[in-house]
Image (tube, rainbow, N blue to C red):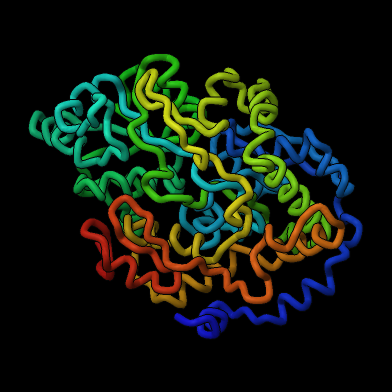
Amino acid sequence: MNFKKILSAVGVSLVVGGLASVQAEVGAPEKEDLKFGFIKLTDMAPLAIAYEKGYFEDEGLYVELEAQANWKVLLDRVITGELDGAHMLAGQPLAATIGYGTKAHIITPFSMDLNGNGITVSNQIWDEMQNYVPRDSSGKPVHPIKADYLKPVVDSYIADSKPFNMGMVFPVSTHNYELRYWLAAGNIHPGYYAPHKGDTSGQIDADVLLSVTPPPQMPATMEAGTIYGYCVGEPWNQQAVFKGIGVPVITDYEIWKNNPEKVFGINAEFAEKYPNTTVRLTKALIRAAKWLDENDNANREEAVEILSQPYYVGADYEVIANSMTGTFEYEKGDKRDIPDFNVFFRYNATYPYYSDAIWYLTQMRRWGQISEHKDDQWYFDIAKDVYRPDIYETAAKALLEEGGFSASEFPNFATETGFKAPQKDFIDGITYDGSKPVEYLEKFKIGLKQEVL
C-alpha cells in the first residue's frame, strides 16, 4: 500500500502534523496529582526514571507509582479510575477496546520499549532437549534455539498421555503471542480460543497447554513442577539461571528482532478531559526513555540500582543487570552480548506505530480471541482508535522547542504514516507488512485464517 493510500485507510491527514506544530506550547496540566500502576518488571523503567529524575515534576505533575498484583487488577483499576494510567501489555488497550475479556476504551500515546522477554524451560526439559540442540565447535548451543528441538520432547509427553504445561503472563500479553509464535514455528500447536463458544482456555487442539501465571511467580511455579517452562519479561528468566532451576532457551529479540513490548495505557476519557496533562506525562516518559538509552546505555547501571529497590522490581542488582546492561545469560556461565535486549528509545521505540497495534490484532485473530474474519479496514480502524501518535507528536514537538532533543531522534512527522516498512526478522522467515493484515494471516501454517472454529 502506498503512502497516500495508507493515510486514507487510517483516516489520517498531514493536517494533523500542522496542528500539532501550532499546539507545541502545552498549557498547564488540568490534573496535577496522578497515580500510575506498574507490574514488577524491568520494562517499567521509564516510569521509575521519570519519577526519580524529576521529569514528572518538571511538567507540573505529582505522581505516585504503585505496584499492582497482576495484569488484570492493573487494567481493572485503570478502567475504574483508581489509577490514572499504567504500564500495560500492548494487547490490553486493544483487547479492552474491542471487548475481549472486558470492555473499555483504553488508548496509548507512548510505547514503552522494544524486546525484553525470554522463554525459559526447566532443567529437566532442557536435559531432554539436549539430543536435538545443535552445538558449535566449542560445544555451546547454537542460537537461536528453535522449538523444533522441543517438539520431540513434547511428542513424548503426548505419547505418554502427560500434559505439557507452560506459563505466560496474560491471555493478551506479548508473552502469550511470542510463546505461541515460537511453538508454532516449530510445528507445535499452542491451541485456539473460541470465546463465541464460551471457551477462553486457549487450549483447543493444543499440543502444549498454556496458562496464566503472574510474572514474579514464574520461577517458583516452575520449580514446583506445575509448569515446565514459561515466557516472561525480565528479571524472571535470569532469576531462573541464578537459582539454578531453568535455562532461558531464546529471547524475544531472536523470535522477532526489535519487537514492540509494553505501552503506557490511559482511559480515553482521561485523555479527553485532561489533554494537557496527557501531553505532559508523555513528555516526561519520552525524556525518561531517552535517558535510559543515552550514550550507548551509559546510564543503565544507575537504572539497575533504582529498579532493584523493593518498591520497583525488587530483584537483586546482579539479576536485573544481567539483561539490562547488554548481556543475557542462557545456561549458567553462557553469557552472551545482546546490546538491544532492552531498548527504550532508539529506533523510535517510543512512537506508537499503528502497524505494531495491527500485529497484536493479527495474533488475536490467529489464535481465535477474535472469533471471526475481519477485513483490513477493521484492523486499521481499531489501531487508529487505540494508538495515538497525534498525542505523541504534540509532546515530541514541545520537547524539540524546549531544546535537549533533535529532530533526528523522532520520526519525520511530516511524512510518517504510522506504518513501519515490512519487517523480515522473524524466526520463521515470514515477512510482516502491517498494511496487509489479512494477507499476513494467510502465511501461517498453524493459525486461523478466514474460518470460524
Q: Is residue 136 above or below residue 415?
A: above
- One can see residue 69 in this view: no
Where residue 452 sits: x, y (%)?
27, 66
Q: Is residue 110 above or below residue 335?
A: below
Q: Nearer the viewer, residue 308 or 205?
A: 308
Quadrant the C terminus occupies: bottom left
- One can see residue 368 in this view: yes
Q: Nearer the viewer, residue 357 or 92?
A: 357
Report the residue at 90% width, 62% height from top: 27
Quadrant the N terminus occupies: bottom left
Report the residue at 85% width, 51% height from top: 31
Quadrant of res 53: top right
User: Image check: 99 left or right of 168?
Assistant: right
Q: Residue furthest front?
A: 137
Where residue 309 sits: x, y (%)?
68, 21
Q: State how many labels appear.
A: 0
Q: Residue furthest top?
A: 243
Q: Nearer the viewer, residue 179 or 370?
A: 179
Quadrant of res 125: top left
Where residue 131 sits: x, y (%)?
14, 27
Q: Is residue 253 above or below residue 167?
A: below
Q: Nearer the viewer, residue 135 or 132?
A: 135
Q: Residue furthest left?
A: 159
Report the residue at 59% width, 80% height from top: 11
Where residue 246 sits: x, y (%)?
35, 21
Report the residue at 56% width, 32% height from top: 324
